[in-house]
Image: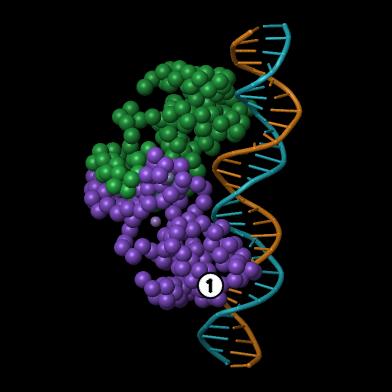
Chain colours: A green, B purple, C orange, D cyan
Amino acid sequence: MANQTKIALLKGYIETKGLKSTAQRDFIAETFFKTNTHISLEELLAKVKRKHKNIGYATVYRTMKLLGESGLAIARQFGDGQTRYENLPEDGHHDHIICIKCSKIAEFQNQKIEQLQSETAKKLGFTVVNHKLELYGYCADCS
Amino acid sequence: MANQTKIALLKGYIETKGLKSTAQRDFIAETFFKTNTHISLEELLAKVKRKHKNIGYATVYRTMKLLGESGLAIARQFGDGQTRYENLPEDGHHDHIICIKCSKIAEFQNQKIEQLQSETAKKLGFTVVNHKLELYGYCADCS
DNA sequence: TATGATAATGGATTTCATTTTCATTTGCAA
DNA sequence: TTGCAAATGAAAATGAAATCCATTATCATA
Ligand SMILES: [Mn+2]
Ligand SMILES: [Mn+2]
Ligand SMILES: [Zn+2]
Ligand SMILES: [Zn+2]
């Protein structure tokens, strides 16, 4: 999805929620849409501050929360105590494997696992809305 | 595993680490071994304080960290910002499914999922040490 | 049993990520 | 334009967890 499309979707979301579009939100969102990592709020704020020194922590937090709610960003927590956000992947949902030595993050998709999850949940009477699957171990370089 | 066995294992672990056995550690560990939920440190501290008012939260934190390291307790984080601990399951590793309405937690085991995880990791050059799989959704009562 | 080295304790303090507060500014519908 | 609800940003508050430090406990050795 093109970043311009995302910005349009964001404006739509903001409108339906009765919120207001602001220069700060636009700039923070644009800055985020250009990233391609699992970026922390601290890192994103630093990027934002390069052009707009006066934008504060709270606005970045608030904007990213909004992007998360709207489905235009995915919040991730890899156990280091910091929330990270990533852009929507082009090819749908993925999960992560994290190196416990060098913190490298690899992504994977496995339709079979997803299916088994649903089946397992069904047996327990649950309906799955979302899930978190993280593998931790050593990457090729570190093992 | 019997709680007495666990206490013995803990003492062994403490010894090999060059640490010391104390009345507080023993009592905190015993109290924890008697639980059968995913207990938060706050809840555990409350239980501990019923008998020993002067035991502080720092000691509970430290003791549970020790139990986690020794493998006698499993630390869990279900996304509510609090670390929870659970006792070793009798029948080996399990994962969780959490109701996003009533917070009910169900446990499950699925050997096929575990196997697919290893295979997936292998393809990416990783060796899995541990993993986190949590399903979130609605339980039978809440859907 | 006393001693001394070392680890543990617990209350207080600090850290760190995140949230909230609040005075001020901004967006936007009428 | 103007009214006013929403947003902003600096600062303070929050809450979980870690750390500090004076005191206490453990334990091997004398
Ligand atoms: Mn990712
Ligand atoms: Mn469990
Ligand atoms: Zn690595
Ligand atoms: Zn429920």
Q: Quadrant of the N terminus of chain A?
A: top left
Q: Nearer the viewer, residue A74 or A28?
A: A74
- Tell me which residue sits at (45%, 57%) in the image: B38
Q: Does B2 appear above or below C23?
A: below
Residue B7 visible in the shown view: yes
**Percent coordinates x, y for residue A91 in the rendering:** 30, 29
Residues packed near mark 1 inside 10 Å, few (<14), some (14 to 19) or many (20 plus)? some
Q: Nearer the viewer, residue B21 or C6?
A: B21
Q: Does B84 appear above or below D14?
A: below
- The residue at which mark 1 appears reads as B27
Three-letter code, disc 1: Phe
**Percent coordinates x, y for residue A88 in the rendering:** 38, 29
Q: Circle 1 sits in a helix, a strand or a loop, which is it? A: helix
Residue A143 visible in the shown view: no
Q: Is residue A8 left or right of residue C23?
A: left
Q: Is residue B46 left or right of residue B1?
A: right
- Tell me which residue sits at (48%, 56%) in the image: B84
Q: Is residue D22 left or right of residue B114?
A: right
**Percent coordinates x, y for residue B29 in the rendering:** 49, 69
Q: Does B7 appear above or below A14?
A: below
Confirm or reject: label 1 Cβ below 8 Å from ligand 2: no
The answer to which image quadrant residue B24 occupies is: bottom right
The chain carrying label 1 is B
- Tell me which residue sits at (49%, 38%) in the image: A40
